[in-house]
Image: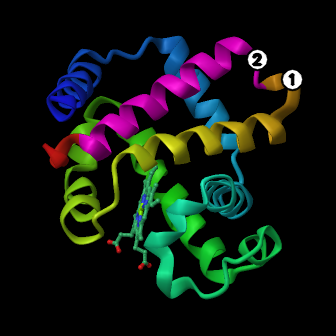
Amino acid sequence: MLGIHACRKSEEIITMVEWSDSERSTIASVWGKVNVGEIGPQALARVLIVYPWTQRYFGSFGDLSTAAAVLGNPKVSDHGKTVLNALDKAVQNLDSIKATYSELSQLHCEKLNVDPDNFRLLADCLTIVIATAFGSAFNPAVQATWQKLLSVVVAALTSRYF
Ligand code: HEG
């Protein structure tokens, strides 16, 4: 029941999404200021520290036992960059995010067995890290557009689960 509901909601988000010129330029502007090599590692590290149960997917990453270990772990850094580089694909393909992430969604579902709730947790940590880095430039209007983008990304990554 819950699964069906989540599926419908995801489909609705992806199917109905439209981007205004102002949203497109806001996304381009935010993304242009994101330092992938810093923001990616910080966002993934936050997920692993704030929601420690997510560490179960990264058993091969070595020491994640303390916040300092997570923050200093080179595999976490590398994977954080990988995730943010994948986000670039959404930014460059705003009108076809679902298709863009179809294979990645299937991989996370069938091979990595990642619970799709975790996509939202990562999206929220990413927003917090960006808000911290940008300060007052990340105003409510910018936040609204940015979180709209991440909602579509999360829905697209969830799309092959159902
Ligand atoms: Mg995932 C691999 C992107 C959230 C766990 N993730 C990957 C890869 C990409 C990616 C591009 C490499 C795929 C490949 O090897 O072909 N991940 C990605 C995005 C997002 C995300 C864009 C959300 C915005 N991933 C995510 C979350 C978890 C997770 C929330 C778990 C909490 N990803 C995960 C794991 C791997 C990947 C365990 C394999 C890592 C490895 O073994 O190197």
> Which residue corresponds to mark 1?
136
Q: Amino acid at mark 2?
A: Asn
Residue 159, horizontal then vertical, whole percent: 21, 41
**Image point (28%, 40%), residue name:** 156
> Which residue corresponds to mark 2?
139
Would you identify the image quadrant in which residue 14 lies?
top left
**Image point (59%, 64%), residue name:** 80
Would you identify the image quadrant in which residue 26 lies?
top right
Q: Which residue is nearer to you in this view: 153 or 109?
A: 109
**Image point (67%, 62%), residue name:** 45
> Which is the main secondary structure of the residues drawn in magenta?
helix
Q: Secondary structure at mark 2?
A: loop
User: Does 78 sit above or below residue 146?
Assistant: below
Would you identify the image quadrant in which residue 28 lies?
top right
The stretch drawn in magenta includes residue 154: yes
The disc placed on residue 40 is none
Marks 2 and 1: in contact by CB < 8 Å?
A: yes
Question: In this figure, which colouring scheme has been used for the structure?
Answer: rainbow
State the count of labels: 2
Q: Amino acid at mark 1?
A: Ser
Q: Secondary structure at mark 1?
A: helix
User: Does 22 sit above or below residue 45?
Assistant: above
What distance separates the C-alpha of mark 1 from that of mark 2?
6 Å
The stretch drawn in magenta includes residue 141: yes
Residue 154, horizontal then vertical, whole percent: 38, 39
Image quadrant in which the N terminus is located: top left
Identify the magenta region.
Answer: 138-158
**Image point (56%, 29%), residue name:** 27
Q: Which residue is nearer to you in this view: 85 or 55?
A: 55
Q: Quadrant of ligand 1?
A: bottom left
Residue 137, horizontal then vertical, whole percent: 81, 24
**Left or right: 83 with respect to 45?**
left
